[in-house]
Image (tube, rainbow, N blue to C red):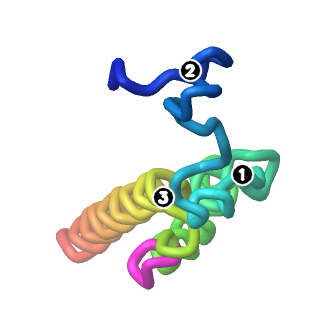
């Protein structure tokens, strides 16, 4: 911390103080509101709901790849986790279908 600046009332009379105010960047104020879906955001909500309805993982992956998180960077981690879950689900389904088809074709 810079020792030349103070918020003390004595230094205020001399003109040496740092004003305590709002955020330095007014762009940060838009993140003061809570995230939707009980504060966990669309991504994490989709991840949790995806275990019941896997289509939600693909919805969140769609939002992730079309950069929905540019509107709110706090959504990035949840959307990314849902995109990974969608990928794992797709690989698991492809492996299961391959095994079933291979077993049915073999005598």
- Left or right: residue 63 versus residue 101 is right
Q: Earlier in the sequence, mark 3 or mark 2?
A: 2
What separation in Å lies between label 2 and label 1 (alpha carbons)?
32 Å
> For residue 105, what is the image quadrant?
bottom left
For marks 2 and 1, give the one nearer the viewer: 2
For marks 3 and 1, give the one nearer the viewer: 1
Q: Characterize the magenta stretch by its predominant secondary structure.
A: helix
Judging from the image, what secondary structure is the residue with disc 3 in? helix
Q: Residues within 10 Å of mark 2 (few under 14, many from 20)?
A: some
Q: Residues within 10 Å of mark 3 (few under 14, many from 20)?
A: many
- Left or right: residue 30 versus residue 81 is right
- Left or right: residue 107 versus residue 10 is left
What separation in Å lies between label 3 and label 2 (alpha carbons)?
53 Å
Q: Residue at x 63, y 36 (%)?
A: 20
Judging from the image, what secondary structure is the residue with disc 1 in? loop
> For residue 26, what is the image quadrant?
bottom right
Mark sitting on residue 11: 2
Give the residue at mark 1.
Answer: 32
What separation in Å lies between label 3 and label 1 (alpha carbons)?
24 Å
Mark sitting on residue 52: none
Judging from the image, what secondary structure is the residue with disc 2 in? helix
Image position, residue 1 (x, y; %): 35, 22
Looking at the image, residue 49 lies above or below residue 103 = above
Image position, residue 96 (x, y; %): 34, 61
Give the residue at mark 3.
Answer: 82
Instruction: Read off the magenta span.
Output: 64-68
Which residue ends up furthest to the left in the rendered image?
106
Q: Earlier in the sequence, mark 3 or mark 1?
A: 1
């Amino acid at each position: 911390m810079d020792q030349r600046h103070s918020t003390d009332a004595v230094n205020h009379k001399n003109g040496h103080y740092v004003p305590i105010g709002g955020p330095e960047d007014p762009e940060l104020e838009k993140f003061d509101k809570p995230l939707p879906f009980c504060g966990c955001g669309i991504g994490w909500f989709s991840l949790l709901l995806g275990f019941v309805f896997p289509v939600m993982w693909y919805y969140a992956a769609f939002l992730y790849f079309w950069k929905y998180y540019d509107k709110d960077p706090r959504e990035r981690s949840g959307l990314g986790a849902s995109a990974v879950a969608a990928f794992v689900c797709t690989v698991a389904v492809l492996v299961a279908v391959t095994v079933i088809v291979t077993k049915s074709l073999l005598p």
